[in-house]
Amino acid sequence: MKTSSRDAAVVIVTVAIVFMILIVLILGGVASYQRVAAKESMQRALVAEQRAIEMAQVQDAIATREQAVADQALADAQILADTLLANKSDSDATATGGVASAAGPSTSINQLGWLVNHWQHVDGQASSEEHWIAPRGGIMLGVNRSVNAKGKTSFEYLRIESNEDDGMVYYASPMGRGETAFSLLEIGQDRVVFENPAHDFPQRIVYWLDEQRRLHARIEGEIGGKPGQSEWIWSAQR
């Protein structure tokens, strides 16, 4: 009888030991799985971080290249302005025996002196600016540059010219391409309007100063038979 009791106790102890061993093995397996899962999650996070860094570097490189293009465009515009002014001055000097007449073609364009400045508006990552130099020899030169929130840059070469045959004419060359002429329609105190009814859009270009001496520029006309317009407002930078 005592032998049977001892055998039963041995069996119970043995079963208990085996059960405990199984529990330890199961817990060890769970812990091992968790460690593997945590390691994989960490690796995925590191890969995602590296990709984000690479994308940021690519975007920075693109923004740098576009800024360089815009800066070069401004530099080219200044060189073009200097060249045109020099040529115009030489031509006027030859025609008048070396003395420019105050009653000549420069007189009316001098009324646009209020336009001369470096005008700019910044909205977060986006910016728009237009720079006009003083009239001389019957010509004013300007350049426009816009950068959107994604860093994409556009620019435009501008010219206002006064002559005896055509009056005052505004020339626009978007992205440096062929120019479009807009003839003077209206000029007044701190306001000027140019028009080209034959152009697709815009047909009119309007500049004016508001009471705060901010420069407004508006293009307007018809798009697909419907009226359309866009307007910019800039503040003087000097």
Image (tube, rainbow, N blue to C red):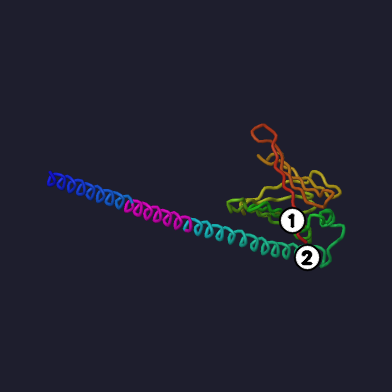
> Where in the figure is residue 202, as x and y percent of width and height?
69, 41
Disc assigned to residue 119: 1
Residue situated in front as seen by the camera: 15 or 44: 15
Question: Mark 2 and mark 1: span between their CA atoms?
Answer: 35 Å
Horizontal relation, residue 156 to residue 27: left or right: right
Callouts 2 and 1 close, C-beta under 8 Å? no
Instruction: Give the residue at x 74% y 47%.
Output: 217
Q: Nearer the viewer, residue 51 or 19?
A: 19
- How far across and down, in percent of the image, does residue 125 sit? 63, 53
Residue farthest to the top? 225
Q: On the rendered image, what quadrant is the N terminus found in?
A: top left
Amino acid type of the residue that numbered disc 2 sits on in the rendered structure: Thr
Task: Give the mark nearest the N terminus, 2 or 1.
Answer: 2
Classify residue 165 as left or right of residue 180: right
Q: Secondary structure at mark 1?
A: strand
- Disc 2: CA contacts within 10 A as few (<14), some (14-19) or many (>=20): few
Foreground residue among 215 and 90: 215
Amino acid type at image mark 1: Trp
Estimate the x, y position of residue 10 in percent, counting from the top left. Answer: 17, 49
Residue sitting at the far bottom: 98
Region rendered in magenta:
31-53
Locate residue 41, reporting x and y percent: 40, 52
Give the quadrant of residue 222: top right
Residue 100: in magenta span:
no
**Mark 1 neighbour density, 10 Å: few (under 14) some (14–19) many (20 or more):** many
Give the SS element for disc 2: helix
Q: Which mark is residue 94?
A: 2
Mark 2 or 1: the one toward you: 1
- Name which residue lies at 79% across and 65% down: 93
Q: Which mark is residue 206?
A: none
